[in-house]
Amino acid sequence: MSRIVYVNGSYLPEEDAKISVFDRGFLMADAVYEVTSVIDGRLVDFDGHLARLDRSLGELDMPAPADRDTLLAIHRELVSRNALVEGLVYMQVSRGVADRDFAFEPDMQPSLVLFTQTKALAESPAAEQGLRVITIPDQRWARRDIKTVQLLYPSLGKMMARKAGADDAWMVEDGHVTEGTSNNAYIVSGGRIITRNLGPEILAGITRAAVLRFAREAQMEIQERPFTPDEARAADEAFVTSATSFVMPVVEIDGTALGDGAPGPVARRLREIYIEESRRAAI
Ligand code: PDD
């Protein structure tokens, strides 16, 4: 199946879409990205993703490729041209094209690429079963608050999980869990939701912000602080959040089953609320 993708001003069949071999995104991972979920053919939390993109660009001194309304129009056009009902829109901004050099000129023209991907988000077998995760050392660079395309270590981490017969990995630094390979990590202990506080060590998830807001509105107690793998293995339940998984229960950590080994009530309730609210607020 051929998709229509967007590259630097043009909507093209995917096989005709081209990026220069001198693009710094390709040569140096000098690029940032966002993944926005689509439900009922509409975008979830688009403005949250745009705000984080602006922040990532600012941290790297990269100019914005277009304004908010133009980017929204491109997202919507791709959803429409690909008749996407449920899935995601991937958007990548790189610094642009230049002769290979570690230094870069301040006034480069950014490259902008967007494509869609179909994915069952609301009805997911994984959400019924829950994920099994392993813990691995966090060997990423130190600015994980910037959403760059340097995804080699998280990708290797996911493969380590697969080889260990698990679904995903939680990364550990200085004795504390940072986050999952492509999601934020949470445990539930004694009725409290515990998740790593924001900082350069983790990505400020857009789903995380929404889920914490819904949890507070539902009078759930939240602690934003680092937690250890031991604390996680002894927790009553656990879950992860991201634009591609919403709220996904975790049922096993390093081979230790949490609670009765089934998705826990807090994760299941937050998933329900998140899906309901996203359907209502998507644009
Ligand atoms: N990843 N932490 C990391 C390291 C991530 O890569 C992601 C998202 C998140 C959750 O962020 P959000 O809730 O805004 O999706 C946290 C996306 C989905 C990806 O790379 O595909």
Image (cartoon, grey):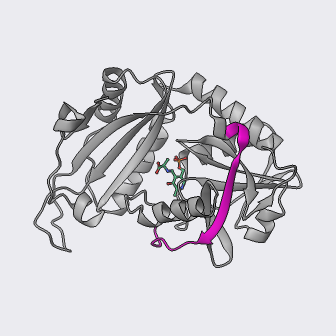
Relative vertical location of residue 272 with respect to residue 113 in this rendering, above or below: above
Which residue is pictured at 41% across the width and 64% down the height? 152
Residue 153 shown left or right of residue 187 in the figure: left
Q: Is residue 236 highlighted in magenta?
A: no
Q: Position of residue 255 (x, y in %)?
A: 75, 62
Question: Which residue in the rendered view is the most extreme toward the bottom?
Answer: 174
Residue 217 in sight from this viewpoint = no
State which quadrant residue 166 falls in. Answer: bottom right
| Position of residue 134 in the picture relative to residue 56 (left or right) | right
Q: Is residue 128 magenta?
A: yes
Q: Position of residue 10 (x, y in %)?
A: 17, 33
Residue range (magenta): 127-144
Please tell me whether residue 168 is drawn above or below residue 28 in the rendered image.
above
Q: Nearer the viewer, residue 109 or 180?
A: 180
Q: Quadrant of the N terminus?
A: top left
**Residue at the (64%, 30%) spot, across then down:** 275
Q: Is 28 drawn above or below residue 42 in the view shown?
A: below
Which quarter of the picture shows residue 226? bottom right
Q: Is residue 102 visible?
A: yes
Residue 264 image offset from top left, x and y in percent: 81, 44
**Is residue 233 left or right of 153 when viewed as pictured?**
right
- Most extreme residue toward the left is 99
Residue drawn 86% across and 52% down? 259
Residue in the foreground of this view, choosing between 74 and 90? 90
The spot of residue 85 in percent (x, y) is 46, 22
Identify which residue is drawn at 53% across, 41% down: 244
Query: How many badges with numbers are in the image?
Result: 0
